[in-house]
Amino acid sequence: MGPVLAGILQLVALIGALALAYIPLGTYMARVYSSDKHWRVEKWIYKGIGADPDTEMTWPAYLRAVLAFSLIGVLFLYLLQRLQGILPGSLGFSSVNPAQSFNTAASFVTNTNWQSYYGEQTMGHVVQTAGLAVQNFVSAAVGIAVAVALVRGFARSRTGELGNFWADLVRGTLRILVPGAAIAAIVLVACGAIQNFSGIHEVGQFFNGHSMGGSQQWNGGAVASQEAIKEFGTNGGGYFNANSAHPFENPTPFTNLFEIFLLLVIPFSLTRTFGVMVGSVKQGYAILATMASIWLGFVALMMWTEFAHHGPALQLAGGAMEGKEVRFGVGSSSIFAVSTTLTSTGAVDSFHSSFTGLGGGITMLGMMLGEIAPGGTGSGLYGILIMAVIAVFIAGLMVGRTPEYLGKKIGAREIKLAACYILITPALVLIFTAISMALPTPPHSMLNSGAHGFSEVLYAFTSASNNNGSAFAGLNANTDWFNTMTGLAMLLGRFLPMVFVLALAGSLAEQKPVPATAGTLRTEKPLFTGLLVGAILIITGLTYFPALALGPLAEGLAS
Amino acid sequence: MHNSLTNTARLLGAGLRALLVLTLVTGVIYPLVVTGVAQALFPDKANGSEIKADGKVVGSSLIGQSYNLPLKKGQETPDAALQWFQGRPAGGLGSNSVNTRYKLILSGATNLAADNKVLVQQVKAAKAAVVKDNSVPGYTVKANEVPADAVTSSGSGLDPDISPQYADIQVHRVAEKNNLSVAQVEKLVKDHTDGRTLGFIGEPRVNVLELNIALKDLVAKH
C-alpha cells in the first residue's frame, strides 16, 4: 500500500469514528444544557460560587458573567506565572517575565494557546497543571456556553432569557469535558504518553560519544491528562515545545489519529446539539454538511500539495518530511494540520512553516475562514451560525424578501450585529500585521526572509485573532512587541465577537416566531448548504486575498 | 453608581470562587486521579517507556538519541559514530536558555521554509553525507536512493524512528564497521521494522534505539 492510499484510509476511518460519535454525543450535550436537574456535586459547586443556577440571565447579564469569569482567569494565570519562582512544586523554575506572563494568560483564557515560551524549560508542574490545564477546560466550557446561549436565542421566543452562565460553565466542564478528557488521557497513557510528577530527572543514554552509557535530562509531568483536554477542548498548548510532534505527547500513529478525532468531535457534534435544541435535527445536518464539505476539501488540497512536495528544499529531499515525524508521515500530518487550523486548536504534529508554500497557505486560510469548519468548541458553532445569518440575508436580498432563519426575522438589528462580528477578526489581523511590518523592529523577529517572512507575521496575527494558537514558529514571538500585541489580538478576537453573539442571541430570543410559508428559504436543504459554503468562501476570500497573495500564494506559485 | 460597583464586585467574587472550585476539580483532582490510574495500570508507559540494555536504562523507546563522536576542535556539528545506525537530522533541537542549572533538551523543528536557501544547503549536505557514509567497498549508495526522512529534520527533533529505506541503506556500512555479515544486519533490520498500525495507520518505521540495542547484543555474541 502506498502512503497516499494509507492517508485516504486514515481519513475514512476518522470520518467513520466521528460519524459514530455524532448522534450520541450531540444528543447528550443537548440534554446537558436542557436538563433542569442538578448533580449533587454541582449543587455544592453552585453553593461555593454563591450563584443560583436556575436564575435566567438576559444577554447583558450573561455577557457580564462571561467577562468577569474570564478577567479573573487572566489575572489568576498571570499571577501564577509571576509567582512561579516562590511556588512549591515548580522544579525551581524562575518566575515568568511580565510580557510573557500576560501573553500566556491571555492565550490560555481565550482558548488560543499561542505559546511564546518553551514548555519544557519555562513552566513547572503547578503552572502547567493547576493553571494552564485548568483554562484548557474552562475556556472550552465558556465557548460552548456562549454557543448554547445563541442556540437558545433561536429556540426561545418572547423572552430575553438565555440561560444561566454559571450552570452552563459548570455542566460543560463536569458533564462533558472532564469525563471525556479522563478517558482520553488513559488511552493516551496506554499508548505511551507520560503521566507522572517526577520533575526533571536523569535518564541513562545509549552512547555518549566516547563510550556506551552517559545520561540525559528529561522532563516528567502530567502530560497525558493535559494532552487529552488540549485536543478535546480545541486548545492546543503543548506541554513540550514540539507540541503533538513530541513522542511523549503523541507517541504512536494511532494516538495521532485519536488526537485528530478528539479535536474534531465536539465541534462537529455540536451541530447535532443545535439541531436537537431548535427542534429540527435536519437544520443541524445542513450546518454539519457545510462544515464537513469545507473540511474535506481542505484535507484533499493539503494532501495533494504535501504529497506533491513543491519547493526547492523539499524537491531536493524527495518528500515533504521537513518538520514531520516518520511515524505519522505526510498523509496523517496533512489531516492533522487542516483539522487543527479549521478548529481553534492550534496543536501541531508537524511544523507548518516547513510545509509547501501552498500547504502553509491552506493552514492560514483555514483560520481566516473564522474557524467554523468545524471550528472551536462552541466558537465554531456560533461562528457558522453568524455566517448562516449572513447567507440567509444575502438570499433574502436576491428575492426581495425579509429574510428569516429558524423562524426568526433577520432584521436591521440582527444583520448589524452579524456584520460587526465578521468584521472584527479581519480588522485585527490586517491592522496588527500592517503595523508590525511597518515598524522597524518587529520584522527582526522573522526567521525566514521574503514572502515566507511576511507569512510568519501574518500567520501570527491570524492565529492570535482567531484564537488558534499554531504558528509559523520560526518567528521569535518572545519579544515585548509580539507578546503584547498578540496578547491584545487574542483578547479582542475572543471577547468582542462574543459581545455581538450574545447581543444577537438576546435580540432573537425576544422575537415572536414567524410561521414558515411557501416563500421561506428552506435552510435544512442542500441548496442552503451550497449558499452557505459560497458565502463563507467569498466573504473570507475577498477580505484576505491581498494579504495571502503577498505571502503563501507568492511562495507557492514561485515553487 | 454605588450600586453598579457593588454588583461588579459581587460578580468578580463569583468569578473568582468559580475559578477556584473548578481549579480544584480540573487542576488538582483530575490530574491526580489520571496519574493514579495511569501509574496503577501502565506504570512503564506513564514513566516514559524506559528501555534497558544489559540491565541498565539506556533511554526511552519513544525518544530518539544521537549516535555521534565527540565534537572535534573547530567543528560545529560532530561526526556520526558510523558503527551505529543513525537517526534523522535534528536541526531544530535546542538547549535551555532559562533555568540554566538544568541541561534540558528543547524539542522543536527548524521551521525553515521550503524555499529557504539555508534549508536547501542543509538537505544538500545531509544527502552528500548519507551517500558518502553509507557507500562502502562493494556497495554504492545513489543519491536518488536516499529517502526524504534521512535528510530532513523531524518536527520534534526527537523522532525515534527512521523509514525502512533509510535503515536499508545503512546495512552495509553497519555490517562492515562491526565485522558482521550483511545478511545478519539485514535480518536485524527486518526484525525491527514495524508496518503501519492495522495495515493503514501511520507509516512503516524502524525504531533506531531498539535496533542499536539489538545490534550491540549481536556484536557481543559474535
Image (cartoon, coloured by chain):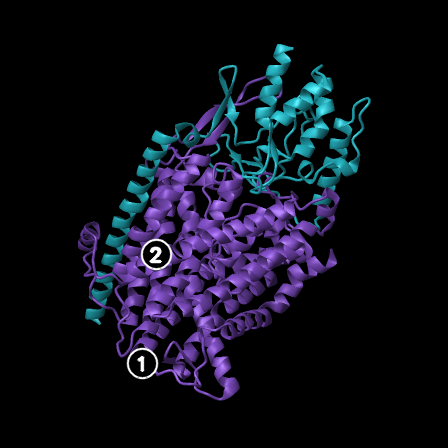
Q: Name the amino acid type tagged 1.
A: Gln
Position above or below: A126 against A550: above
Q: Quick one: quadrant of the C terminus of chain A?
A: bottom right
Q: Quick one: quadrant of the N terminus of chain A?
A: top right
Which label sits on residue A317? none
Q: Name the amino acid type tagged 2.
A: Ala
Of the chain colours in the picture, the one used for chain A is purple
Write down the chain letter for disc 1.
A
As drawn, which residue projects farthest toward the bottom? A400
Tell whether A150 sits left or right of A394. Answer: left
Q: Are marks 2 and 1 in contact (CB under 8 Å)?
A: no
Q: Which residue is label 2 attached to?
A: A141
Q: Which residue is label 1 attached to?
A: A511
Rendered cyan, the chain in question is B
Which residue is located at x 38 percent, y 47 percent?
A132
Residue A486: percent from left, percent from top: 49, 57
In the rendered structure, which disc, 2 or 1, sits on the residue that comes first in sequence?
2
Front position in the image: A215 or B127 = B127
Neighbour tally class for label 2: few under 14, some 14-19, many 20 plus, Cα within 10 Å: many
